Image: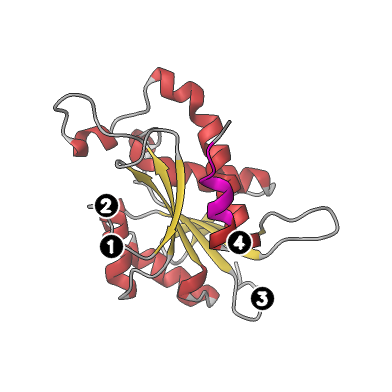
Amino acid sequence: MSAGDGSATGPWLVAGLGNPGAKYAGNRHNVGAMVVEELARRSGTSLRAHKAGAIAAQVRLGGLPGNPGPAAILAVPTAYMNVSGGPVKALMSFFSVPTQQLIVIHDELDIDAGVVRLKRDGGEGGHNGLRSISGALGTKDYHRVRVGIGRPPGRMDPADYVLRDFSPVERKELPFVLSDAADAVELLVLRGLVDAQQQVHAPRG
């Protein structure tokens, strides 16, 4: 895989967070990786091993027939969540991605299950993957697509909750959530953060 040509400022990097291995694949904590897989499916491609410590693919996002969208790298680090920063930084270096064109997709306890929200900069909310990326890059100033998973029921430890698979009821809704989050990524790269937020965050009738 060679570096993408991208725009004058380089391609986008869309990194979906999760933990590697089959036992984690269905966990709530892996929803970011699931969204990247949905984007790859839409693009008609598959993620392949990259020397940066990730699986990745070069695509055009959100384009129309005869009008390809912006160049992007879809990626899922193959390291554990709490050391995601190394692979993300290595991918940014390899593909010459500027920080303002990094999008990290992750699970969010403080957002209701199934709700998607966009933001740039700000704290990590205790999320180990975000903390690792911020530490590796030396900045928190990058885009996030936050996929709500809600708070754990009762007195369940949040650390246990995120490492459990989605419930049967949640799994029925999951394809729609992944589609919404993938739509949000495409809107972000095509229209910019403010316009994308206005559409994604608008109340649904």
The mark that comes first in sequence, 2 or 3, is 3
Read off the residue under disc 1. Answer: 132
- What crowding class fits label 1: few (fewer than 14 Cα within 10 Å), some (14-19), or many (20 or more)? some
Is the C-beta separation of discs 1 and 2 under 8 Å? no
Q: Secondary structure at mark 2?
A: loop
Q: Residue at x 24, y 30 (%)?
A: 152
- In the rendered structure, find residue 171 and report the number of the disc placed on it: none
The mark that comes first in sequence, 4 or 2, is 2
- What kind of residue is marked 3? Ser
Read off the residue under disc 3. Answer: 7
Q: Is residue 163 above or below residue 130?
A: above
- What kind of residue is marked 1? Ser
- What kind of residue is marked 2? His
Read off the residue under disc 4. Answer: 189
- Mark-to-mark CA distance, 3 and 1: 27 Å
Read off the residue under disc 2. Answer: 127
Closer-to-camera residue (40/146): 146
Asked if residue 188 lies in the magenta stretch, the reply is: no
Q: Which residues are magenta?
A: 196-203
- Mark-to-mark CA distance, 3 and 4: 12 Å
The mark that comes first in sequence, 1 or 2, is 2
- Mark-to-mark CA distance, 2 and 3: 31 Å
For the N terminus, give its image quadrant.
bottom right
